[in-house]
Amino acid sequence: DQQVKQNSPSLSVQEGRISILNCDYTNSMFDYFLWYKKYPAEGPTFLISISSIKDKNEDGRFTVFLNKSAKHLSLHIVPSQPGDSAVYFCAASVAGSQGNLIFGKGTKLSVKP
Amino acid sequence: NAGVMQNPRHLVRRRGQEARLRCSPMKGHSHVYWYRQLPEEGLKFMVYLQKENIIDESGMPKERFSAEFPKEGPSILRIQQVVRGDSAAYFCASSPGTGVRGYTFGSGTRLTVV
């Protein structure tokens, strides 16, 4: 049973436009959410995170939005750049957990020049 | 300050052999997590260790898999009598303390069982 779902396996966006990556979750005990970026043959790299007490967190071109009532979060990248092309994973952790993360299956973003 | 170091990067084993995957955490990090990524899947938690202790192994298969993090040296993920289904990318992450803040992943070991 997938607790973290990324329903779009892939997304293609033109350079300079906005990329919106979506993530849904089912476990109401999740209290911290993270987005990771992954290039082929490399490990995931932390991008941005958000605590469940917030609804938005921004870091440069990256903004994460959290809608707790809908159990939905999204990552916005504006403006998108070709170097953003990678697989993006949404991950969550349970309140009071030891630190193990629950990952979605990822969305492959392609930014076309 | 080197990041999380995993070796080997690629490992090929025949069915029935043993696989040993190593992970050296970042300097100052005493918490190590192992994850497995099967093809077309997300990363799945396997085990969480601190020095000389297994804290949470709820994601580990019941048989053939074991992990350790000795007082000296890297953390080791050991898979005995490998089968084709063990072929995957295995990632190690380390953190300075309990919790997901400061989590850093290594580049992974890609295990291929032939």
Image (cartoon, rainbow, N blue to C red):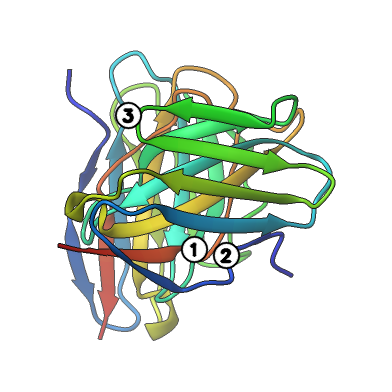
Residue shown at the point (56%, 60%) measured from the top left: A104
**A15 lies left or right of A88:** left
- Do marks 1 and 2 both belong to one polypeptide chain? no
- Amino acid at pointer 1: Gly
Give the x, y percent position of residue A18.
Answer: 39, 52
Image quarter hosting the C terminus of chain B? bottom left
Residue positioned most to the front: A17
Q: Nearer the viewer, mark 1 or mark 2?
A: 2
**Residue B13 sits above or below residue B1 on the image:** below
**B58 lies left or right of A106:** right
**Subunit ID for the residue under disc 2:** A
Quickly name the residue at label 2. A6
**Subunit ID for the residue under disc 1:** B
Can residue B56 be seen in the rendering of this structure?
Answer: no
Quickly name the residue at label 3. B25
Residue shown at the point (43%, 76%) measured from the top left: B40
Quickly name the residue at label 1. B42
Residue shown at the point (23%, 52%) measured from the top left: A42
Give the x, y percent position of residue A66.
Answer: 67, 40
